[in-house]
Amino acid sequence: MTSTIAPRVRTLVLLLLAATGLLLAGAGPVSAHAALTGSDPRQGAVVDKAPQQVSLTFSEKVALADDSLRVLDPKGKRVDRGDPAGTGGTTYSVKLHSGLPDGTYTVTYQVVSEDSHPVAGAYTFSIGAPSKTSVSVDDQAAGGGVVGVLYGFGRYVSYAGFIVLVGGAAFVLGCWRGGTAVRSMQRLVVSGWLALTAATLGLLLVRGSYTGSGKVGDIFDLDLLGQVLQTKTGAALVSRLLLLAAAALFIAVLFGAYDKRDDEEKRDLTFGLAIGGSVVAAGLAASWAMSEHASTGLQAGLAMPVDVLHLLAVAGWLGGLTALLVALYRAPVETPVDGAAVRRFSRLAFGSVLTLVVTGVYQSWRQLGSWSAFTGTRYGQLLLVKIGLVVLLVGIAWISRRWTARLAESGAAVSAEAAEEGENEADADADVEKERVTSGAVTSAATTESGAADTGAGSERAAQLARQRAAVDTARRKRERDADPNRFGLRRSVLAEAGVAVVLLAVTTMLTSTEPGRTEEQAAAASSSATTEANAAGALTLDMSFDTGGEDGKGVVRIDLDPARSGANEMHVYVLRPNGRAFDIPEVKVAFTLEAQDIGPLPVVPDHVSTGHWSASGVQIPMAGDWKIAVTVRTSDIDQATVSKNAQIG
């Protein structure tokens, strides 16, 4: 039966790793946790005279480098001067050269948000009148490319290593202390330590390129590494490495000196290991909480300890689950994991799940802020997937709990049967010994003469027979153990739990790299406020969502009409991804219809100005009224859609 199970385990593990890889590959560039909520000049604005500086406002504080904010003229030449600097709160600016000529200028930014995620983007504004520009701002995204994939993989491995290290050690120390002498359990915990250590070192090396140039060649740039060490994220990673050194000592004691102590010394050592291990585990969890999303935003002082508890609960549940799976499949016959250990883990898992629910509800409220963000933001959608996986995991755990109860009942019955069998064997051994003593006197003389010659061969033969009997006995007991339907059922249910846990960890890793729903809605509200202000000044701005159904088929098309009066008007069209970044599509067409007067449709084909930006001058609106503005967007040779809105013009 073991030979049948092992290939299934390997196949399932490979499938789970493939699914995880697809999830990570589909994550794309990191969605920043800081969003651009305002700018001066604003996106698409046409100003009468050249501004002295360009200012950007974000949803939270960001870290700046020397070239974090750049302003480029229509030919792509930089026109900013000096280093960017904060002007108070979350607003940052860079000064411009004086006497800038008319035309369309491009503003690009690449900063690091307070919760460690890179933020990049670009937009355009015009002085005097729009013009053609040679600047391409397509795919202005931070954290993408090969470096982004490497960083995302490192984050996943670090989470997995932490869970296996902390959860595996907690399972051995709190649920199955006999596992300290089991080689497979030792390898599991040490593998978690090695994975977390290697991933942390890798993240330190990749971090500089990840938040900067994105080039693979910059990974081993020592200057960048020095800059990373001066940041909050760098300090957190270094702290994690120091704590891992303490964790190595904990592992050495747990799987070395612990098993050699007597019962009284073990009790004292268990208490010390529990206290020390809890402190180290909490410190490792805090290295994430102090540098990522919990460290900024609403109620950061409360969010960080809650995040630590959340991570420890995840490790206790999923890491302990992994350890239980290894114990069920790899524990030797001499020291099998018993029902009592499984019951203790069941209680540990139940407490971990309760902690996860409480801390998860708080984190969801903090990151979403509204019910609409569940379905209206990417963070909320991923959170719904995570909740679904947790519910599925709890359901499978309930099945495992039933198998645990049956295993405990069968274990008690087997123990009673073994005790009775032991008594019968003792009686039989006594009879054999009596017969041997009786016949010993008769054969002692003959044995004395020939014993000297056969002693060597006989002892060797006896040792060989003993080894064979031991091997046969071990194989028999293993077959009997594996044939137990309760243990087999528990194995399958725990294996299914572990499979769901792998996917859950991948979704969680993506979730921590996604812009929170609260931030996304704040950015949308700021954009709406800017639109309202523009409309109050006489201009008209309309946002219309479209979905052509193809690749890159979802987005928002924005129409700016100035002065939105009868006669000649200036029109700008912007095509934006759902995350607010501009991108190009093959064709954009606009048509105006005044249905009340049976006028139109009046077609307008704007000229492409820059990435995601089209414009048209002298757009004639013959009379005031409630005009229907229809926009046709084509995202490929066959995929297109027409969206429309009504607006009062004049």
Image (cartoon, rainbow, N blue to C red):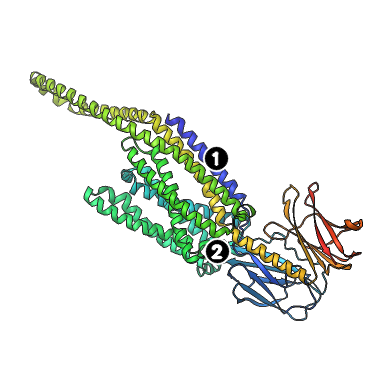
Q: Earlier in the sequence, mark 2 or mark 1?
A: 1
Q: Amino acid at mark 1?
A: Leu
- Identify the residue shown where x is 44% and y is 52%: 355
Label 1: element kind: helix
Q: Nearer the viewer, residue 621 or 410?
A: 621
Q: Quadrant of the N terminus?
A: top left
Q: Nearer the viewer, residue 1 or 280?
A: 280
Report which residue position mark 2 lands on. 116
Rendered location of residue 76, percent (x, y): 75, 69
Question: Residue 303, relative to residue 643: is it above or below?
Answer: below
Mark 1: few/some/many CA within 10 Å (<14, 14-19, 20+): few
Height in image: 12 above or below 581?
above
The residues bearing labels 2 and 1 have C-alpha atoms spaced at a distance of 32 Å
Q: Residues within 10 Å of mark 2 (few under 14, many from 20)?
A: many
Q: How many numbered discs, if any?
A: 2
Mark 2 lies on a secondary structure that is loop
Contact between labelled residues 1 and 2, with CB atoms less than 8 Å apart: no
Within the image, what quadrant is residue 378 found in? bottom right
Q: Residue furthest front?
A: 596
Which image quarter is the C terminus in? bottom right
| Residue type beneath disc 2 | Ser
Report the residue marked by disc 1: 15
Where residue 24 sits in the image (x, y, percent)? 58, 50
Judge left or right: residue 637 versus residue 349: right
**Does residue 515 show up?**
no
In screen coordinates, is 499 left or right of 446?
right
Residue at the image position 38 percent from the left and 29 percent from the top = 484
At a point 91% along the width and 56% down the height, the residue shown is 600
Q: Position of residue 631 (x, y in %)?
A: 81, 56
Q: Is residue 279 visible?
A: yes
Identify the residue at the far bottom of this view. Answer: 98
